[in-house]
Image (spheres, coloured by chain):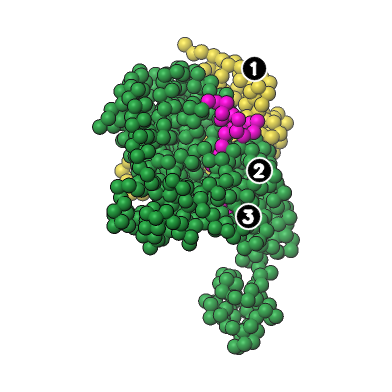
Chain colours: A green, B yellow
Amino acid sequence: MPHLNTKEDLEIMGKQLLLDREKINKTLIVCGGTGCTASRSRDVIDALNKALVIQEMDSEVHLRVTGCHGFCEQGPIAVIEPGNIFYCHITPEDASDIVTKTLKNGEIVERLLYTDPVSGEKVRTESEIPFYQAQDRQLLFQNREVNPQSIEDYIAIGGFSALAKAFGTLAPEEIIREIKVSGLRGRGGGGFPTWRKWTECREVPGDEKYVICNADEGDPGAYMDRCVLEGNPFLVLEGMMIGAYAIGASKGYVYVRNEYPLAVKHARNAVQQARRFGLLGENILGSSFSFDVDVARGGGAFVCGESTALMASLEGKVGEPRPKDVHTVVDGLWHKPTTLNNVETWANIPSIILNGANWFASKGTKGSKGTKILALTGRIKNTGLVEVAMGTTIRHIVFDIGGGATNGKAIKAVQTGGPSGGCLPVDKFDLPVDFDVLYEAGSMVGSGGMVVMDESSCMVDVAKYFLTFLQDESCGMCVPCRLGIDRMLEIVTDITEGRGKLEQLDLLEELADTVTQTSLCGLGKTAANPVLSTLRYFRKEYEAHITSSKCSAGVCKALIEYSIDPEKCTGCGICLRACIHGAISGEKKEVHIIDAGLCQRCGICKSECKFEAIQVS
Amino acid sequence: MLHYVTINIDGADIKAPKGSSVLEVAIEYGICIPHLCHVPGLSDIGACRLCIVENVTNGRAVITTSCTLKVQEGMAIRSNTDRIKRLRHNIAELLVAEAPNSRAIQDIAVRCGVKEVRYPFRNSNCVLCGRCVRACAELWHANALGFVGRGKERHVERPLNMREEFCKGCDYCIQLCPMTITPCDGPMKPGEEYLCGKCESQLMITEEVPDSCAWCRLGEGFNCGRYAGLKAVR
């Protein structure tokens, strides 16, 4: 077991590993991230391994199982180097073709190539795919270069050299100055300048300080932190080590959601391997700096993503926030100065140290620098993880990267920032992804969730969904959050069920304002954002629900009615057989009729009808 | 020896012992800041949010609860601005809609100027102020009560819902509970709750002399810090 005692040891090892790597002619990179695992990439990997053994190619081809590549829509994904050939939607049955045709004979398997949904053409290489072309992948690109379970892989691509550089040439204050010049802001949601947190924590007297990596990502539809921690845990670890060195901390914690088993496994494995290599422990790389990291599993509460609640949970208490009249950088974990940063923030540190602050600051806008990973989901063609430079417009992300709406429907809004963020309408799509600009517009970058909605989404229902989520996840400690969200949900439910009154909208706004201003923690303070932003941009929809009892998107069950268009109905009887409530009647080859009294508005008939004869009004 | 700092509440310079909270100092000096979950001698958790004040730093007014805010030299506090009054009114309205059958909560609502409730009444048994939980844990170290569940499900419960033997029978939880004091006219029937408004004459006093403690009868009901302190002296 090589124990790295000095920086030179690390350098020599890195060179040796790179040489070993170059000896291998062909590399088959298969995504083993959560998205692809869900589409059976484990079976594909097993089949590929078997096929390699059968073809006796297992010695010359290196099969690398990596973390997420980002294009989860197309999973399972494989990339073959050299050649950069990109295969998607692979099944275990395709394994032998990939091995015999592509790896052995250098032929392309046409049916596995990616088809561009816009032009309809097959794309051969990964770099030619528009989804990837339109991005600026600084962090996510590294995912395909490393096997997340192997520290050697990470060292081979220059891993931990930022740490060595920091130890060798930079004093802790200089590191903080670099971060300050880089303009890095917290990626977890608030967008707080990272250097300020570090400086305050460094300046507080105290011999024991902590750094924490917050991987308790809980926003619906968001999985950036998950993919970074699953795909490249060493990068996060290196960032934490540099941060700890700058702050003067001797102990770190990675707080991972227990719902992310792969992230827990990979983080634990990374810590163990780093310890074995002497990269964690006493006198790291021959310096006087000692540091160790533990991985803690979360208990399943959304509120534990809030810094003080997370610390309470780490201490073994109930995960409830406490008032932040004294900041956690002064009085944090076990009442010691503590710096807590998000996974993505930590992951950005090594490249800033390595490439310089100016390199990082050259990307992005005036107030927001660098790149940001976004989880692009919803009613668009290309869903997945995208990484773009700050300042990229929403339009570019939704239409150029996301490929626009599915089924040719018009896109109506995008929800950014998860339950703490807001909904932005299409006419705001020229806004850049920038902490301050989106905040001004009533939403936020947040952790980076981006849910695209088309005209079949009812904005009142969206607000109701997020309120339901927050009501479940509120810890219930303070009055405005517990009762305020509950009452907001009550009002919104009234509106969706046709009992709403116009004056309730003002009450809703006032209540939202009260919750925002008086709640104890960040969860409550931002809980009203979904309501406030939908009220701001889609007030007409709320009013239509109340005054004319109409849900234009056809979502709110109490306000819609299903009927059959007599001109389109062919009397095939499919809807009649599909209706589980017996609400449809009609003779064969004659127009069918829906009994509004019996209809439960489940929508099965609409999805079954081949002639689009079912109307919603 | 006690060290003192000078803070300013609503324009008055006040000498306050170091380590005390803004709420304690305000009550001591006869400045009325409505509060529910604060009990003198127990730790403060900032749960009811009624005691919110504006803490002015660098010209920016940050809203925070005065019970958890420790005094600092040169602090400027505003306890009775229009913004604070409006927010406090809304919180009190939420509370009284939840528990109209408690005189303590009704009194707080009156004190905060709630004259009409815009939500349907609910008549819960507990507003989760946590007075009982903290008294049990901190005064007697009994830990016979605790919070269980989160969000809507949050409630006060014995350990594991069964271990009664932790209770030392001190009855302090009952004395501190704001729900034990029924409205003057007796308990209201479900579906017939209303704001009793009998103490609105008291509101006149607090309106005439805003932000000063008028020793109103409203405080008696829920053991306002002033009355509780007096009780302790007696």
| Disc marking residue B13 | 1
Q: Is residue A375 magenta?
A: yes
The magenta span reads A356-379
**In this rendering, which labeled residue sits more in front, label 1 or label 2?**
2
Chain ID for label 3?
A
Chain ID for label 1?
B
Instruction: Give B82 or A582, whichever is nearer the viewer.
Output: A582
Residue B117, visible in the rendered structure: no
**Kind of residue sitting beneath label 2:** Thr
Q: Which residue is mark 2?
A: A393
Q: Which residue is mark 3?
A: A404
Chain ID for label 2?
A
| First-in-chain label (3 vs 2) | 2
Say which quarter of the image contains residue B93: top right
Q: CA distance from mark 1 to mark 2?
A: 51 Å
Q: Secondary structure at mark 1?
A: strand
